[in-house]
Image (cartoon, rainbow, N blue to C red):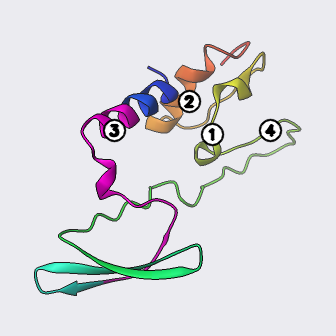
């Protein structure tokens, strides 16, 4: 399945099992402080600061938060992007695509690209 299919599936799953109640989106965490058997979170949303207590904390910043770009000899006038910037397979429509790297992201993007690009 494509990235979009998986995203849709996970969102429907979370809605069906009412999992969104445990998540907060669009805010900046200012601090996480242990408070005995729980954690105190202080966060800011739209300029408003709030604190709340939770039983556990999961930090997931992503391994590709800061893209590691390749440096190649010669010149290239096409588009050069990192997997962290990839959002839509339409980007590859009728193009010749070179994917550098064989990690999970590169493989996932190759699967999307092969359905859109002239060649991958």
Is residue 102 visible to us here? Answer: yes
Is residue 103 visible to us here? Answer: no
Which quadrant holds residue 13?
A: top left
Label 3 to label 1, Cα distance in Å? 26 Å
Q: Is residue 83 magenta?
A: no
How many tags in the picture?
4
Element type where label 3 sits in the image? helix
Q: Quadrant of the C terminus?
A: top right
The residue where tag 4 is placed is 79
Taking depth in this image into account, of 82 and 16 the one nearest to the observer is 16
Q: Which of pointers 1 and 4 lies earlier in the amino acid sequence? A: 4
Label 1 to label 2, Cα distance in Å? 8 Å
Q: Which of pointers 4 and 3 lies earlier in the amino acid sequence? A: 3
The picture places residue 109, in percent across and down from the top left corner, at 56, 29
Q: Residue at x 21, y 85 (%)?
A: 34
Magenta part of the protein: which range? 10-32
Task: Check contact, mark 4 vs mark 3: CB within 8 A.
Answer: no
Answer with left or right where residue 20 lies relative to residue 83.
Answer: left
Q: Which of pointers 3 and 2 lies earlier in the amino acid sequence? A: 3
Task: Check contact, mark 1 vs mark 2: CB within 8 A.
Answer: yes
Label 1 to label 4, Cα distance in Å? 12 Å
Marking on residue 109: 2
Label 4 to label 2, Cα distance in Å? 15 Å
10 Å neighbourhood of mark 2: few (<14), some, or many (≥20)? some
Label 3 to label 2, Cα distance in Å? 27 Å
The picture places residue 50, in percent across and down from the top left corner, at 42, 81
Taking depth in this image into account, of 90 and 68 the one nearest to the observer is 90
The residue where tag 3 is placed is 15
């Amino acid at each position: 399945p494509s990235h979009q299919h998986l995203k849709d599936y996970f969102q429907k799953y979370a809605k069906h099992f009412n999992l969104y109640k445990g998540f907060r989106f669009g805010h900046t965490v200012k601090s996480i402080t242990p408070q005995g058997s729980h954690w105190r979170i202080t966060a800011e949303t739209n300029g408003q600061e709030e604190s709340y207590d939770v039983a556990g904390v999961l930090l997931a910043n992503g391994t590709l938060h800061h893209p590691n770009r390749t440096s190649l000899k010669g010149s290239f006038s096409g588009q050069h992007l990192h997997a962290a910037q990839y959002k839509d397979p339409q980007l590859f429509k009728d193009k010749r695509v070179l994917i550098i790297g064989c990690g999970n992201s590169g493989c996932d993007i190759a699967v999307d690209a092969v359905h859109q690009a002239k060649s991958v």
